[in-house]
Amino acid sequence: MPSDLHMHTTYSDGSLTPEELVDAAKKAGLHYIAITDHDTVDGIGSLYERGLYPARGIHIIPGIEFSAHHTQREIHILGYNIDIYYGHLIDKLNDVTEARWVRFSEMVEKLQKVGYQITETEVLMIAGASKSISRSHIARLLVKKGYFPSVRVAFDEMLNKGKPAYVPHYRLEVGEIIDLIKAAGGTPVLAHPKLIGDDGLVESICQQGIEGIEAFYPQHNEEDTKRYIAMADRYGLLVSGGSDFHGFPTRYPAKLGIFTIDDRFAEKFYRPVRKL
């Protein structure tokens, strides 16, 4: 059976609630899944507190996706099997969440000053249950109001680094994230290494205590995947992969089950659910 270890819910910037995501994953025939919302574990927490995790018919791995600080590159680190109630993790996530809110407010203000008629309230309506407010929520509002034809164009024109509405935000350091995930009982994995755009930097991170690398990813071609599997072998890392599913028709994959990995990779990350 196929698996998918990278997906997002409405608790960050996905379109499906955690319940809807699990149901969709079951219908797609997935065996192992990991919910990896940006800078939050609230989606997994919601399932657990409602008695829906663990779930029948599918193995759920509690996860998260952190954005790491770097002056030039975008580095994301996945954490699998974390204790979502670990106190130090919660404290750090609260810090990140607070910084995200300040940042989003500043970005909205910048957009207003150059003529885009949007409000913080409208962005929050787009974000819904998410406390992890991101540029994608702002971009979706700009598209909804007809200012841009797509989220990608909104990013390229206004929201990316160096563009008029960009605001830098607080991020933890790579080593800090790796240590935090391990302290929370989890396995840190470098997400979509090709998107970093610097394999020298990728190799450096592989030597900083990371325990896995996401070799299978929609934007990796066959050569990329082989290269990162070889890198995993060289540094003794686990091989991971996932669709980075958000659930929007304009973003591949639009449905679960289109991009998957073999169970033999996913099962190495799974641990039977312990009492949280």
Image (spheres, grey):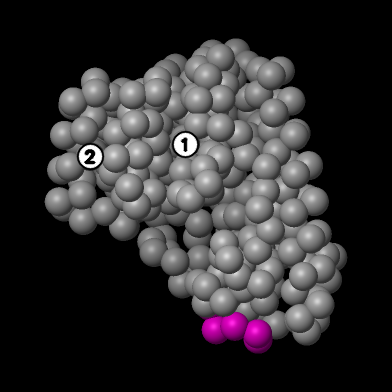
User: Residue 213 vs residue 222: left or right?
Assistant: right
Q: Position of residue 184 (x, y in %)?
A: 57, 17
Would you call the spot at circle 1 few (<14 residues within 10 Å), some (14-19), or many (20 or more)? many
- SS at mark 2 in the image: helix
Compared with 69, 126 (above or below) is below
The structure residue drawn at horizontal position 50% and vertical position 60%, both measured from the top left corner, is: 247
Q: Amino acid at mark 2?
A: Tyr
Q: Position of residue 164 (x, y in %)?
A: 66, 72
Compared with 236, 139 (above or below) is below
Q: Amino acid at mark 1?
A: Ile
Residue 129 in view of the camera: no
Q: Position of residue 120 (x, y in %)?
A: 83, 65
Front in this rendered view, residue 7 or 189 = 189
Residue holding disc 2:
228
Q: Is residue 144 magenta?
A: no
Label 1 and label 2: CA atoms lie apart by 15 Å
What span is colored magenta in the figure?
A: 146-150
Q: In the rendered image, which quarter is residue 33 located in?
A: top left
Quadrant of the snapshot with the N terminus: top left
